Image: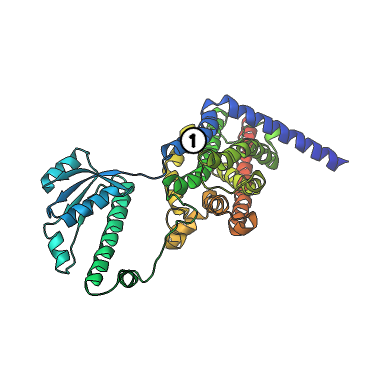
Amino acid sequence: MKRKVYFKKALIDIAEIFTEELKNIFKDSGVVIIFFAAGLLYPILYGFVYLNETYKNVPVAVVNLSHTSLSRSFVRALDATPEIKVSYKVNSMEKAKSLYAHSDVYGIIYIPSSFSDDIHRGKQTRVLAYSSMASMMYYKGMYSAINYVSLDMGTRIQILNMELNGLTEQQAKAAALPILSQGHALYNPKGGFATFLLPAVLVMIIQQTLVLGIGILAGTAREENTFHQLIPYQRKYHGTMRIISGKGLAYFVLYMFIGIYNLLFIPYLFKLPHYLTLGAIVPFLLPYLLACIFFGMAISVFFWNRENSLLLYLCTSVPLLFISGFSWPGFCIHPFWKTISYFFPSTFGIQGFLKMNTMGASITQIGFECMGLWVQAGFYFIIAFFVYRWQIQLSEKKINRLNK
């Protein structure tokens, strides 16, 4: 009977703390902006920014000093590629540099005067390319176009020379291209930037906005509480497990909706490759949200005011995205940073979501990532428990000292 009464009392306390935390969230305009405005609008903003997927028709200037039919054919082939557009044909590098300085072009292609002579003599010639590095997309477009045209023209010249030496057209093609190959970008058929970047950003937004919101609430609690402690000295806040359960449940309920919106609706909205269904995303979101929630609660002890969490958000978002292993192979990341990355839920979350959403893996096929998230959830739950327990004890000591 006592256990039944105790259990009922614990549920009532958890419900009160859960309700109180929801009230704190919705009456704090800063937290509402972070949770709902940022959590719901950031994915749409990123999606529209990269809506075109690929950057085409990079404007370039061509300095053609060869003035031959072969060099003009090379320039026409460059202009025919989808990656670049020959916007200007000039006769000197000085003029091309002037166009580049005024941002009229983002690259310069230099064809030397010896271009055709070298080819007719059987010598290797060179074409120089200068690209703006203001964006890697400029470099990628120029490199892809020049590489494709150079290989194609080189192959045609080789076939022509073999035909002049007595080979048939079929024999010459077989000799010049003994192996025909085709390249396909797995899981990113368009080769688009949104397909590459957006899934990882969606997972990162969930962690960062959740931790930021918890940090703002913690900073507000310290500013408003009598002893500037994380936990107010009230009757219902004496049970550490009840506090963590009530607060964590409030965050979990809100972010289950936000998580489904980000990871299920946004890829569908922007027509990104996606294989997930509601039944598949929930088992993945469960450990990920718990890990993020308890991680935020564990480090909330360091937030003495509302602004501290903003600094953490700004300083960690980009580094955590890079060390997660989505933009650079994980086995190439330095072991030190690889170890550091395992302390953040975003690392396992990004890898697991990419495998499920983009590659079509099932929840059982991302066992390593799910296990990592469950371990993190348990680890940070224990830390949060001791952190909150410590704060409660500090409040009790100070109130007892005043009563004496």
Q: Nearer the viewer, residue 193 or 173?
A: 173
Task: Pick the quarter of the image with the N terminus.
Answer: top right
Image height of 356 relative to 171, above or below: above
Q: How is the image coloured?
A: rainbow
Q: Position of residue 27 (x, y in %)?
A: 58, 24
Residue 403 seen by the camera:
no
Residue at point 22%, 38% (across, down): 104
Q: Secondary structure at mark 1?
A: helix
Which amino acid type is marked by label 1?
Ile
Residue at point 27%, 63% (across, down): 156
In the drawing, does residue 157 fall left or right of residue 238? left
What is the count of numbered marks? 1
In the drawing, does residue 100 fall left or right of residue 285? left
Other-residue count near label 1 (Cα within 10 Å), few / some / many at <14 / 14–19 / ≥20: some
User: Where on the picture, by quarter, is residue 172?
Assistant: bottom left
Residue at point 20%, 57% (across, down): 127
Q: Position of residue 2 (x, y in %)?
A: 86, 41
Q: Position of residue 395 (x, y in %)?
A: 61, 36
Residue 341 seen by the camera:
yes
In the drawing, does residue 14 fall left or right of residue 182? right
Q: Nearer the viewer, residue 236 or 125?
A: 125
User: Where on the picture, by quarter, is residue 334?
Assistant: bottom left
Residue at point 68%, 30% (across, down): 19
Task: Pick the quarter of the image with the C terminus.
Answer: top right
Q: Position of residue 274 (x, y in %)?
A: 55, 47
**Residue lying farthest to the right in this orientation:** 1
User: Where on the picture, by quarter, is residue 254?
Assistant: top right
Quickly name the residue at label 1. 44
